[in-house]
Amino acid sequence: MRNVKLTISYYGGGYHGWQRQKKGITTVQQVLEEAVERALGHSVNIRGSGRTDTGVHAAGQVANFFTDSPIPTEKMYRIITRHLPADIRVIRSEDVSDDFDPIISSRSKLYRYTVFNNYEIPIQVRPFCYQYYHTSDAPTMQTAAAMLVGEHDFASFTPTGQKRQSTVRTLYRCQVWRKYHYIYFDLEGSGFLYHMVRNIVGTLLDIGRGHRSPDCIHEILSAKDRDAAGPMAPANGLCLQWVKY
């Protein structure tokens, strides 16, 4: 048996997130496991680096499984992809040590949220970004975003009642930058809470349009109350860019 690491890209619009759910609900993990089974001739249990919600995309999701298939690992990604729908692609397959775990072994991951800040949106980018009509100032949002870098209790940015031992997380990077009509939010951290990125983006957009002061970030973090933060941004603007090991 060998441990195979996959890097996967997918459009999340047609799936109920990454994690396999009850019968009749299509998820990325389920479709990928079925494709690997057809490609290799045996069932597998695929473990991903983290869950992505319904409608969230990935450019570099990471997963692993164990196999005794004679197929060379460097060719597996192409063979598996032949059995996948067009909106899921395996872009790399490689052997890793037996103790590699896509969650436990990860050092950090980067999520990018894309906003199209104009009325006339190109039809080809609509599925991958949040069309936000209000004028939003990127430098003001960056001032607020910088206050989120470091170790904080992000309880205000996750739904109340989540079963987590701790809501403390570390952000290594929280950057906001504009390119023409696009505003990008890059968040790199050791781990993320449920809906954390989308709630941070929604709050920063409130700040960018002048509804809140950048200094409100301190108050929101101190409150540890979801009602203290801004609205949640839609899922389709979010993409898991990569995971570092």
Image (spheres, grey):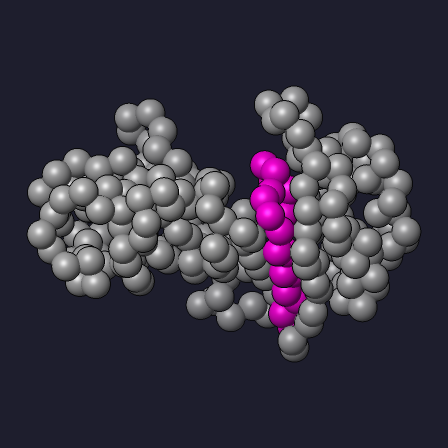
Does residue 148 appear left or right of residue 218 in this picture?
left
Q: Which residue is drawn at 64% across and 42% down?
A: 196
Can residue 172 be seen here? The reply is yes
Indicate the position of residue 167 as horizontal and vertical percent values.
68, 33
Does residue 106 appear left or right of residue 234 in this picture?
left
Which is more toward the observer, 46 or 124? 46
Indicate the position of residue 90 as horizontal and vertical percent values.
29, 57
Q: Which residue is drawn at 77% across and 57% down?
A: 145
Which is more toward the observer, 101 or 238? 101
Residue 87 vertical placement versus 232 (above, below): below
The answer to if 192 sits in the magenta stretch is: yes
Q: Which residue is drawn at 49% across and 66% down?
A: 125
Can residue 133 be seen here? The reply is no
Magenta highlight range? 181-197
- The quarter of the picture where residue 218 lies is top right
Indicate the position of residue 155 as horizontal and vertical percent values.
73, 33
